[in-house]
Image (cartoon, coloured by chain):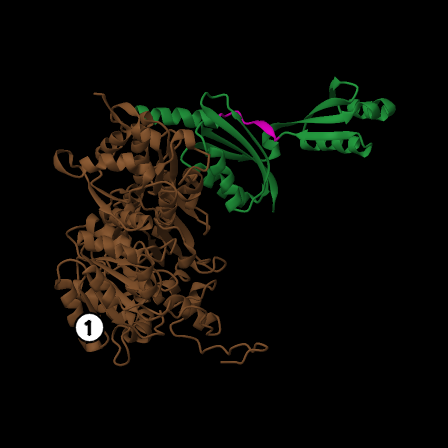
Amino acid sequence: MKQRITGAEALMRSLSAEGVKTIFGYPGGSIMPVYDALYDYTRGEKKAFDHILVRHEQGATHAAEGYARVSGEVGVCIVTSGPGATNTLTGVADAMLDSTPIVVIAGQVPISALGTDFFQEVDLVGVAQPISKWSYQIRHAEDIAWAVSRAFYIARSGRPGPVVLDFLKNAQTEMVDYAPEKVGFVRSYVPYPKLEMDAVQAAADLINGAKKPLALVGQGVELGNAQEELIAFLEKADIPAGRTMLGLSALPSTHPLNVGMLGMHGNYAVNMKEQECDVLIAIGMRFSDRVTGSLKTYAKQAKVIHLDIDKSEINKNVKTTVAVVADCKESLPAITALLKKGDHKEWRESFKPLDKKERAKVIEPAIHPKEGPLLMGEVVNTVAEATQGDAVLVTDVGQNQLFATRYFRYPKHRSICTSGGLGTMGYGMPAAIGATFGAPDRTVVCFMGDGGFQMCIEELGTIMEHQAPVKMILMNNNYLGNVRQWQDMFWQRRKSFTRMMNPCYELIAQGYGIPYEAVTDRKNLAAAVAKMLATKGPYILECAILEDDDVLPMTPPGKSIDEMQLELAPPPTPPVREGRPAE
Amino acid sequence: MNSLYTILVYSENIAGVLNQITAVFTRRQVNIESLNVCASSTPGVHKYTITCYCTEEMVKILKKQIEKRIDVLQARYYTDEDIFMLESSLLKISTQTMLENPEVCRIVRHHGARIVEVNPTYSAVEKTGTTEDILELYEDLNRLGVVRQFARSGRICITRDTREYLDEYLAEREKTVES
């Protein structure tokens, strides 16, 4: 049944029809009609949404990402034109690289003003196109029902991603005979490619013949809700599995076939074994350079089976022997059905001595240090132990992220929010806010460094206003630690602008009325963590970290993954520079 | 090894698709040699004919990245053996010089080009053919110093294949939506 309403109201109804419950946003001139309609839709009889007023539009996108990641729903942002719109671009690019379904709705100047350099006008579709899954300009109110439904369909289907809707102001105020639409088909877009049985058979044959199979599990498994299918597949053929950073909770870390995290700072054994396996089975992962190291030497001995829903990932970085292009929810069971019961005990056992080596050289010193200032690894480990089971891990970017992802535990699905592809500092705090709305029954812990904490620090205001129960763990080492580590390792210890003067975070916490505690002494750590977790609502736990705490192991950039270092190489001799005394 | 590839792209007729297609080339640092955009024989479907020099590995990647754009229906790549192709060109030459030098008309005839306009100031010559045919005509005339303007179109082509892949795709999608 059609009803004559404004475009802004049509947007409200369309969002409601898509099942939207939570909107992260920030008002402004070109989106005022929408905010006016939103006023009614967030209270009283018409209430359909909770609107979370962020403090910066970038925060809205990361919050939408965090929300989407833990809930599996589409995250939604509403912002204004111009700066409001450009502020979302970092989040859009982040969501694109990490396949996160979000829909950004930005106001735009009216159609009569388009292209005139009007106040707060920016060609949003033009700038968003290369970094989004789809961008579209809604020019008239009659397009709304179709465009919004198409946006959600594209964002959530197939390989998910961000969609940007540029919503002209005239379209918000025009009257339209509104009838809801449901887009479930786009002729030019095939989100779920048809499973090719020949490829399934070829993959199964390779796996059945493998002596040293190794699976690489990515976020695709979570996005496809194929966690159970993955376990059935791995268990039947007895295949050890490493997980990418974004795929960490796709396979419970307690599962006996889990052999740890892949990548530059992942686990030692699995990195070494990627160079020894005979069949490599990549499942919903994209062979990022952070996983493969140098492609020239990566897994050259192995036959590669690549399961991905996105055909453009096949042969993009790593040459594939068998490609199975389909949703892994479908391809995994199809392959499993053709597998022989496998037994690769000897192969699996061969990981153990390397694990032992890593535990002795890296893990124990990182999580159970005996003396000196606090280390990031032990902070993460303490929080992981205290939250066993249910917590969602959110991280910022840098050392905090690498330590957190290494030492946290993932017994449950959809338990990690981190900026993997874009590596967006400032992602953590707003993403954690989003996660608290996406998974209101779970504890959300967010590890940040002093750099990233300050990069979206304004979102403390959002946390305060909504009492979003984010347990913030600020691991403060007075450095931009990851860059500092690289400077130490590869740039002759020339610490160019990585040392940072910090504000008094206690006063900042006070300003926002957020409970705060600082830990400087190891003996107080566990109690402080327990207190943080027992406190209702948000909390900031600042930990004074050793200034030159390094993340290990590490594959130096551009090197082969079997050159992974368990300890730091001796410091290189600084080059002698003319006219500049050596330090 | 780099070869010349012709990529045929079909998209829905939605604003902004061309930008998205060219961005794929830019990101992969492949120069577009020529580009032609027009409506295709299928109503509502646009056809892009793009040529570029790259490796086969790269052209496969380009194809997939182009097809990844939501409003692109299909992208396929071809070598020159797989297609019938044409380019058009127009040359504006000085009538005075043409009259003074009989060589000019001889060259025009020799290349099978047509004189489409003659007025006291200039004459217009039209030539259709392959890139090489057109460039040869241009160079021969240019050597005589008569060319005032030269314009060359992008390549257009149809495939030699007996199958119509776009039609097959559209029929397949039609079936999907019905079921």
| Quadrant including the N terminus of chain A | top left
Q: Does the magenta stretch include residue B159?
A: yes
Q: Give the colour of chain B.
A: green
Q: Residue furthest front?
A: A119
> Residue A85 sits in which quadrant?
top left
Q: In this view, does A16 lie above or below A304?
A: above
Q: Is residue A148 shown above or below A340?
A: above
Residue A202 higher or lower than B13, as above or below: below
Mark 1 Cα shell of 10 Å, populated few (<14), some (14-19), many (≥20): many
What is the x, y in percent for residue A118? 43, 37
Tell me where residue A11 appears, x and y as whole percent.
27, 32
| Residue A59 x %, y % | 30, 51
Q: What chain is colored brown?
A: A
**Chain at tag 1:** A
Q: Is residue B123 left or right of residue A63?
A: right
Name the residue at 79% across, 19% down. B120
Give residue A486's quadrant in the image.
bottom left
Asked whether residue A520 is drawn in magenta, I would say: no
**Closer to the camera in the image, A71 or B83:** A71
Q: Give the range drawn in magenta.
A: B154-164
Decide whether the magenta segment is chiefly helix, strand or loop: loop
- The amino acid type of the residue labelled 1 equals Leu
Label 1 SS: helix
* Observer-nearest of A234 and A424: A424
Q: Give me the residue at 36% from left, 39% from top.
A: A164
Disc 1 target residue: A525
Residue A416 is at least partly visible in this image: no
